[in-house]
Amino acid sequence: MSYPPGVLPFIIIILPFLGLFIVWFIGIKISERLGNIATAVITGVTFFLVCSLYPAIAKGKIINWSIRFALPITVSFRVDALGFFLGFISSLLWFLASVYAIEYMKHEHAQTRYNIFSLLSFCGMMGIVFTGNLLSLYIFFELMAILSYMLVIHEETSEAMRAGLKYLFMGIVGGLLLLFAILATYVITGTLTLKATGLAGLKESSYFTFIFWAFIIGFGVKAGIFPVHVWLPDAHPVAPSPASALLSGVMIKAGAYGVIRTIYAIYGASLLASVLSSKLVIVIAIITMILGSGVALLQKEIKRLLAYSSIAQIGYVVLGASMLSSIGLTGGIFHILSHALTKGTLFLCAGAFIHQTGKREIAELKGIGHRMPITMICFTIAACSMVGFPPLSGFISKWLLAQGALQAAENGIFSLSWGFVILSALLFSSLLNAMYYGPIVIRAWFKEDLHSSHSSHSNPHHHKEEKVEKKDPTWEMLIPVIILSLFILAFGLYPQHPLFLARKVTQIYLGGGS
């Protein structure tokens, strides 16, 4: 099915690439701060172009466009409900993070370099979610994986360089596995097209299982699922906070997106329902959920805690995809949105704490709610959503995942005991979330900052300076955080629109249609 403005996805993808030349010129020739503003404008325009696709997607249309080269190679672009859903989330968070970076990056070095690689990574991300075949997917996946390395090492500290090296090495390994899987798929099936029913030729292949796990591990590296998650806890904390929000809130979703496409568009749910591999993916998802949350409990630095939490949360998405039930898939897709909003909020709030106070250790954030009340209110909303408190978006996704487990057991996809294990894992993971987010929130609101109290007695003038320095940040940093927090609340109270899109994806893959 074709839609007249088929070239629009290509424009959306290429706009950040063309915009980087404007940002480079402004940042080098005029002002780095104006370059930051230009980056925010470019990402904002891209976001509104993505939104303009919604009327067509809401009507069930699929937007296709392709470029044919002299060689028998076609780069294909396709926007369906899943692609639009990820595109909306990615462009929204990139826009807000870029607005946040106007102030946050003001005193950072190499601001223009940061903006250029942010736009290049954005180009790669939009290419991933608007891809029409496996070749396009691989090209943009590798583009984003390699270029986002520059965001990880931006600070250029020894810690950042080590984390960047690990990130790059794991990305190369994942990329090679994907390349093998894609080439093998083409040799066996003769096509690279992503179909709603899967590629039937894989069913008869003796390499069925090997290719499946090459896809899952290749995409899993980027998603940060167990056991290929080892790069994530090091890479996310060392990046500048707006980049951390993008790495955690958006870029690891590229891996989750790839896992969903593998299960439903390359193999097909009906095929995987009868093989052991789908059950093993569920096991990996549960281990990822519990492991990420368990290790997060031991962390003392705020951004490192959030990084391990991201590992746990991506487990929810993979769990929803691997249950092969309509409600479970809907819950997994909705959790992509919920986690992007909440983790984006949490990383940007953590960045505000660091920016205003210089404090990274969780123990040092006692009483921070009294000195930075707006920031901490937003952090509290996001933390409660992570735990799964109603009426926030995190509750909706976890509720759907629990229903999905029961539906899968009822439909005979797996036994009732499997359903009980999944429900127990969801409850236990939520309990762990409460155990590491709860103390942060309680200390922030109900504990006094002893250092500030001591300073006020020993040096009143110094205390006055501390109060001025440690207030909420400027509007450039506050507004994105507030907007994300309002989305968390709005999509918890009124989840109809994101659920509408998530159910359209489910109808394509599990309810017929294409």
Image (cartoon, rainbow, N blue to C red):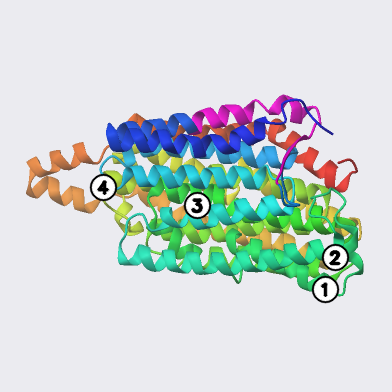
The stretch of residues the image draws in magenta is 43-69
What's the distance in space between the residues labelled 2 and 4, CA to CA? 57 Å
- Distance CA(mark 2)–CA(mark 3): 34 Å
Identify whether 126 is placed above or below 474. Answer: below
Q: CA distance from mark 4 to mark 3?
A: 23 Å
The residue wearing badge 2 is 188
Q: Mark 4 or mark 1, which is nearer to you?
A: 1
The correct choice, above or below, for 462 with respect to 12 in the image is: below
Of the residues shown, which amino acid type is indicated by label 2? Ile
| Residue that label 1 marks | 207
Residue 229 seen in the current view: no
Q: Nearer the viewer, mark 2 or mark 4?
A: 2
Q: Which residue is mark 4?
A: 357
Residue type, numbered disc 4: Thr
- For this view, does 253 lie left or right of residue 74? left
From this viewpoint, which residue is outermost toward the front?
70
Q: Tell me the element at label 4.
A: helix
Q: Position of residue 175 (x, y in %)?
A: 61, 64
Q: To which residue does mark 3 refer?
A: 247
